[in-house]
Amino acid sequence: MSKKWIYGGRRMTVYIAAFLMLIFVGLTAVINPYLGLFGGIVFLIAAVALRTVYLKQAAQAETYIEALTCRIKKAGEEAFQEMPVGVVLYDEAYQIEWFNRFMAELTAERPNLISKPLSELSDQLIPMIKEESDRDIVEIDGHLYRVMIKPDERLLYFFDITEIIETKAKYENEKTVFGILCLDNYDEITQGMDDQERSRLNNEITNLLKDWATEHGIYFKRFSSEKFIVVMNRKILRDLEKNRFDILDKIREETSEEPVPLTISIGIGAEAADFIELGQLAQSALDLALGRGGDQVAIKHPSGKVRFFGGKTNPIEKRTRVRARVISHALSELIRESSQVFVMGHKQPDMDAIGSAIGIMKIAEACGKTASIVLEAEQHTTGITRLLELIKQKETLWSKFIASDQAYEWVTSETLVVVVDTHRPDMVAEPRLLEASDRIVVIDHHRRGEEFIEDPVLVYMEPYASSTAELVTELLEYQTKPPKLDVLEATAILSGIAVDTKNFTMRTGARTFDAASFLRGNGADTVILQKLLKDDLQQYKKRALLIQKAKIYRDHIAIAVGGEKDIDDQVIIAQAADTLLSMNGIKASFVICKRPDGQVGISARSLGDINVQMIMENLGGGGHLTNAATQMDTTIEEAEELLKKAIDTFLEGGDTE
């Protein structure tokens, strides 16, 4: 409130009062001169009295305002100096001109900062001012400050937020994390044991888990023969992530003398708002870990994002023929109840996708239904091209193959869509079929990833199988009336097994050879198979050129990178990776090339020491422990940089988010 305003207001009031009295006296004088004279005398007396009162009050008001102004100025100076906010003035050269007492106390260990550059306080300050940032956080002598910048006044305010940040960090660290720990193959190992041996193994495993839980401050409780509840906080979980959940290795190593080493899987739910959601996330994460073959940890968040740790071993075969028989009968019922059947594999199909699709088509025929195989009208690999040329020679078989657009025109909500050799919705030959149909079946042998086809009515995923063709062959065997396969059909299915097992040298079990024996007994021709898998000279040269470009990364990893203008199909890329892996001293191999569809493909192989599946998942792909791949919409150079970062992250134990 200014003096001018106060005085002006009072003066105006006096003037108005005098003017009104003067009008009154004038009117009175017109009516009666004597009365007007008397009124004039009264007016003069009143005017003198009013002026005296006005001057006295003005003097009092001026004294009050001066005293108040002095107090406000003094309080402002004290507040500016004493308030718990640092204030710094700087000049045009970003040198400190002045700072308040609070800032002086903050920088007591570094006196004489006047005329020193702002970088003496923090290297971040000058860049922040130049970038015209409104506010940011800097660290000074172990404390965190939020800086408010006033560039026009060349003024900085420093608000100490150390306690706020520490409180927030403490809150985040103490968030509850819920998990379910499962002994993957406990039933298989203990099935033939006597009570004493089973008790010994139980005590050994329980003591290992108890020591691990005590060391990290984890609460765990057994609630079934093979499952435990695990409760911890977010800080403990971060510590476990740093050491890559070494309990997985400890359990495996301690039981290595058993006929089959015991492994564990852990599903963890984190960051959820309530305990019910935490439990649901933990169970879902455990299902993912087990679906990927076990011996690993899956951490799931409400957003759906999942991080995986472990998975260093090949999955131990756990599937039973009972399950294969149950799935076979369930699939038959679904086929009979559906109006029509469409079968599709993944984009850029391989022998396994085509072979298993033919197998499902034969199951549909055994159930009295005609099935159609959805095939992309794109360029195919050499092996697939040869197979399709043979199929085209058989009109009855080729008529079952339809284009994706035609399938989309025919599909209805009652159509049964069987997806083989993939479980990712973005990888199927025709994604629109998944949206149009309410009846989806997924049959796959890959380890389950984060992305999965929504709401399938039947899922048969076995990462223990060599190929999807092997799974489909077993489903064929358990049909009530097994369909009759001709030579080409049986050979096509067998080719899927042969390709995925590298001619029965990798990922093969007793069931793999049983399936091959069944197909051989139904007419599969190994001579035709060899013709389908034959290399041509051009392929061999391309593969040799890729191998020639290989370089060693981090001592034992081979990375071969094709040219930006070179186009190679997925088979050549995979074969080059296989060949590199056979070289002495190579533990893992990666081949990066441009594919015919314009994307960059990466094929990854390992001997088991390096989990290439997790590396490829970090790049949006997937696969198995020793065999994985991905496709990226980027340049060759960018793909190589991303691959190296993913390898570094895996080897150095970083977060794979």
Image (tube, helix red, strand yellow):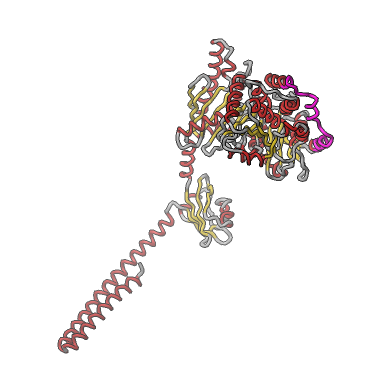
Total numbered labels placed on residues in the image? 0
Extent of the magenta region: 519-545
553 relative position to 184: left or right: right
Determine the image quadrant of residue 558: top right
Can residue 91 be seen by looking at this rendering?
Answer: yes
Residue 551 forms part of the magenta stretch: no
Q: Residue furthest right?
A: 537
Determine the image quadrant of residue 505: top right
Between 430 and 152, the one nearer to me in the picture: 430
Rendered position, 564 above or below 472: below
Q: Kindly identify the residue that appears in the image at 74 percent across and 21 percent down.
A: 520
Q: Position of residue 115 (x, y in %)?
A: 55, 58
Between 312 and 286, the one nearer to me in the picture: 286
Q: Kindly identify the residue that appears in the image at 34 percent across and 64 percent down.
A: 68
Q: Kindly identify the residue that appears in the image at 41 percent across and 56 percent down.
A: 79
Q: Quadrant of the N terminus?
A: bottom left
Q: Kindly identify the residue that appears in the image at 73 percent across and 31 percent down.
A: 396
Q: Position of residue 232 (x, y in %)?
A: 49, 30
Q: Quadrant of the C terminus?
A: top right
Q: Position of residue 185 (x, y in %)?
A: 58, 20
Residue 526 forms part of the magenta stretch: yes
